[in-house]
Image (spheres, rainbow, N blue to C red):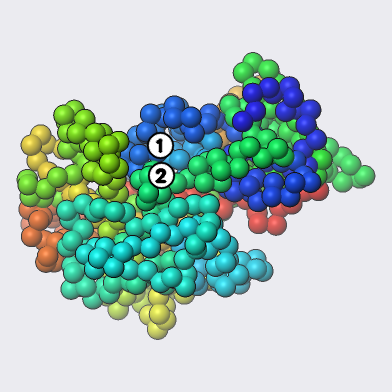
Amino acid sequence: MFQDFEIFCQLPLHYLIVGGGTAGLAVAARLSEDPEVNVGVIEAGPSALNGEDDGAITVPGRYGETIGSKYDWQFETIPQPGIGGRSLKWPRGRVLGGTSALNFMAWNRGHREDYDAWARLGNEGWGWDDLLPYFQRSETFHQPSAAHQEHYHSSYDAEFNGTDGPLHTTHIKQYGPAHQYWHATLNQLGVASSRDSLAGFNCGAWNMVCTMDPHRQERSYSASAYYAPIAERKNLHVWTDATVLNVLIEMVDGEWSATGVRVRHGDKEMEVKAVREVILCAGSIQSPQILELSGIGPRKVLEAAGIDVKIENSNVGENLQDHMMTATIFEVLPTLSSRDDILSDGILREAADRAYYASQTGPWTVLPCSVAYCPLSQVASPTEQTQLHIDAQKVAQETGRLQNELLVEQFNPTKELRGQLEYIFDLGNWSTYFQSEPGKKYGTLLQMLQYPFSRGCIHIPPRKDQSHKITVDDKPIIDPRYYLGPGNIDRQVMALGQRMAKRITKTEPLAKIIQRQVFPPPPDESTSEPSVYEDFVSNYTVTDWHRMSPLPHILLLHG
C-alpha cells in the first residue's frame, strides 16, 4: 500500500486503474501477473485489511452494519414518482474492495440464456460458454460434505465450480432454524429443488452459495482475495484515500486520448500519468460521473454542468437498470431465534462474539440462504401471462430496442422461461417501513424482480450559476425511473408475485412457524387483494442493490 503519494505520481505506470473495488482489484491482479508492466490502482476509500473495520466487514453475520458508515458513499436517488415520490438510499462501497466489502455475500450466476442474450446484442465472446471458464477461474469452491448436503439440501455440480481461484465460495456451515422447511414448502408448490444454481439454470429452490472462507469463517471479497495475497508484488502499486477528480483527456496525434487522471489526496491535487491505458473501474454510479466530469457524455448534460465537451456520447449515464425488491413481514413463533435478537440484546451479542472469535461458530456465521427463482408461469395465470406478453410486445415495438425484444421472450407462454421473480425467506424483520413490537418475533419474505423494463439514468447535476463548475463533490443525479413508462409491466409482475408470496407462506411445512402476516396488513372486506398488492408494491418497493449498465459497451478511448 502506497504511503508517499508524490512518489506514486512519478511512477511509470503502464496501466492506471481508477477504483480499487470489486472489479478494479481483479483487473489489477491479472495485469500485474506480467512483471514487465507497472500497475497502479487509485481508491477513494481506506483499506480495512488492517482490521480497522472491527469485524463489520469480515464477520459474515454482521452484514449490513457498514451501510451508512464511512465505508459507504451514501448515494440516494432523486424522488421517484413510480414509488410514491420516495428517494431510496443506494449504498456503494467506499473502501478497498468496493461494494464486495459491503454486500451480503451472495454468490450467484444468471441463467445461461442471460449471457447468450448479451452475445445476441452484439457482445461477441460474452455468451455462457465463453464466460464460464472465467467464472470458474475466479473462485475456489469448497464442497460441502455428504452429511451437510443431506441435512441442508446443499447440493452442487462440480463440473461448474472453480477449484483454485482467488475468491473463496461455499455453502454456509450452519443455517437458521427456518431453512429446514424451505425446500419441502417450495416442492409442495411445484417448485423443484435445483441441484446447482451456478450451473446455468437457476430456476427452482436452492441454497445460496456465499463468498466466505469456510476455514476462517470470514468474508471473502475483492481486497482479501485479489489484493492481499499479492500485495508485495513490486509492480503493483495501490493508493488509498485518494479521490480521482477526472480523467485527463488530451489531443494526441489528432485524436482524444486518456493520458492519466487528476487526483485529490487530503488538501492537495496532483496528476498521475499512464504510459498505456487508464482503466475506469469506478462502478455503476461513479464511472459515468467521472466520464462526464472528464468531458465525455451527452452534450446537454456537460454544458449544463459547465464541463467542456471533448467527446459527445449520448449513451453515457443512460440505460440504468436495477432489480426491485419488496419485503413482506410475518409474525412467527416466539420460540424462534433470529439475528434481530443479537442486534437488540447486548448479552446475546456478547455471546455471539465469544462463539465466533473462540471457535468460528454461532450466529455470526449464519447468512440468509433460502432462495427460490420462479418463472412467470408459476406466478401468473395463463390469461395474465398472455396479457403481459402482449404488453411486452407493444413496448418492444414502440421502443424498437433489441434488448426489449429479448425481454419479451420472458413472457412467452410457449417458451421455457427463466426465473422472473426471486424469493428469499429469513427470520427477522428486514423492512425499514415496519416497526417491530417488543417481545415478538418476525420473518421476512423478500421478493425481487429479475428482468425489469424500467430504465433510468445517472448524470452529473447542472450548476447553480455560471460561476460554479460541477466537481466530483457534487453527487450525481440518480434517476432509476422505477415503474414508469414501460416499467409499468414491472409493477404488474411484482403485484402478481405477492400472490405467490402468500402461497409460499401459507404452505406447509413453512406455514407452521408463521402466525400471521403483519406487513402489509392482509386485505379485509373493504379492500380487494389485487389493490392491496398494487398499493404495497408502489409504496414500499426498494432497491435490491443490483444496478448496472449506465455506460455504452463500445466506449473505448485511446490510452
Which structural element holds mark 2?
Answer: strand
Q: Residues within 10 Å of mark 2 (few under 14, many from 20)?
A: many
Q: Residues within 10 Å of mark 1 (few under 14, many from 20)?
A: many
- Answer whether labels 2 and 1 touch (C-beta < 8 Å): yes
Extreme residue in the right direction: 253
- The C terminus is located in which quarter? top right
Is 424 situated above or below 10? below
Residue drawn at point x = 40 percent, y = 59 percent: 142
Task: Give the number of the disc on residue 57.
Answer: 1
Residue drawn at point x = 17 percent, y = 37 percent: 341
Three-letter amino acid code at disc 1?
Ile
Using residue 455 as the reference point, say whether residue 171 is left or right of it.
left
Is 19 situated above or below 379? above
Compare residues 379 and 21 and report the one nearer the observer. Answer: 21
Question: Mark 2 highlights which residue?
Answer: 219
Residue 522 is situated, as x and y percent measured from the top left of the image, at 13, 53
Compare residues 469 and 120 and report the one nearer the observer. Answer: 120
Which structural element holds mark 1?
Answer: loop
Three-letter amino acid code at disc 2?
Arg
Residue 270 is situated, as x and y percent measured from the top left of the image, at 73, 23
The residues tagged by marks 2 and 1 sit, at their Cα atoms, a distance apart of: 7 Å
Residue 289 is situated, as x and y percent measured from the top left of the image, at 61, 38
